[in-house]
Image (cartoon, helix red, strand yellow):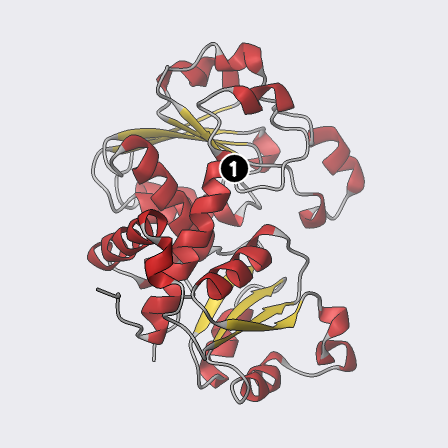
Amino acid sequence: MRHLLNPLDFSVEETYELLDLASDIEKNPEKYSHVCAGKKLATLFYEPSTRTRLSFEAAMLNLGGSVLGFSSADSSSAAKGESVSDTVRVISCYADIIAMRHNKEGAPLVASHHATIPVINAGDGGHQHPTQTLTDLLTIRSLKGRLDTLTIGLCGDLKFGRTVHSLIEAMIRYPHVKFVLISPQELRVPSYIREDVLEAHNIPYEEVDNLDLAMPKLDILYMTRVQKERFFNEEDYIRLKDSYILDKKKMELAKADMFVLHPLPRVNEISTEVDADPRAAYFRQAQYGVYVRMALIMTLLGVKKPC
């Protein structure tokens, strides 16, 4: 039995195999429509989510399986004080695989120690979001044809953004990748990412606060929202929430083959006028998320690729 708690739980070779499977699912969805018949996915979402939860559900349904679970802690026995360990022990009796989102870092790890079925981390606090990272990798590879030799700009909330942290840790495994970290001083990447990940692996990066100057050098621009739910002080959130807004004028500064990604939800950090630009790939990215999660569910359940 295997879990996915961290984007590095899969080796580079295993990640390529997963992305290849996801790409085949994209091209031949009907071939996979019954491979998980009789299997059940439990979605244990202690924190609000739209895209991640529904994409997991769509993934399992597309594979011919079924879904059960809850969409907030208030609608589960957690409201009565039940522990994560007890919850997953019980859910292991009902389902074949678990996707868990929790506001506390490490909760999916705790779950994996007590579950008797595979556990997928669907986001734990500001820590990790491995399935979003796999989605990002598939999106980048599909758009650019490679995962190496890229300059990736990460813009916005780089301090609390778990998608950013996970993507950096995953992308450093591919050669000739550079990062441009675009954020206000207060929202820069945590020191452990800077020192233990980037500097420890000799990955070239620069920290800047000007998006306009960074745009011409980027192959990928990964925008993030400033997350109100991660702030302790509303005044700080209000002061920082509009730090970067990507609009049509800024897009004119970018390469013709640069693509814009965003894990969503979007608030106002990308103007809707950008949506019509063929380089705006964030809604395609959401679709790729379904294919990746289908491939992941199959892999963790040991379901073979159909002929």
Q: Residue at coordinates 58% horizontally, 46% vertically from top-left?
A: 160
Residue 72 seen: yes
Q: Residue at coordinates 52% horizontally, 59% vertically from top-left?
A: 58
Q: Eyeballing the image, is 171 above or below 91?
A: above
Q: Residue at coordinates 61% horizontally, 19% vertically from top-left?
A: 273
Taking the view exactly as shown, the residue that stands out farthest to the front is 30
Amino acid carrying mark 1 in the image: Phe
Q: Residue 34 appears at what percent x and percent y?
A: 39, 69
Which image quarter is the N terminus in? bottom left
Total numbered labels placed on residues in the image? 1
Residue 166 seen: no
Q: Residue at coordinates 37% horizontally, 54% vertically from top-left?
A: 29
Q: Residue 281 appears at what percent x and percent y?
A: 46, 32
Depth check: give the residue in front, 212 or 73.
Answer: 73
Q: Which residue corresponds to mark 1?
A: 283
Q: Which picture quadrant has residue 43?
A: bottom right
Depth check: give the residue in front, 294 or 255.
Answer: 294
Q: Which picture quadrant has residue 305?
A: bottom left
Depth check: give the residue in front, 143 or 165.
Answer: 143
Which image quarter is the C terminus in? bottom left
Q: Is residue 151 left or right of residue 234?
A: left
Q: Which picture quadrant has residue 137?
A: top left
Q: Is residue 73 left or right of residue 34?
A: right
Q: Residue 244 appears at what percent x and percent y?
A: 61, 24
Q: Eyeballing the image, is 285 above or below 251?
A: below
Q: Eyeballing the image, is 243 above or below 104?
A: above
Q: Is residue 221 left or right of residue 196?
A: right
Depth check: give the residue in front, 171 or 209.
Answer: 171
Q: Is residue 265 left or right of residue 147?
A: right
Label 1 Cα crowd, 10 Å radius (few <14 / some 14-19 / many 20+): some
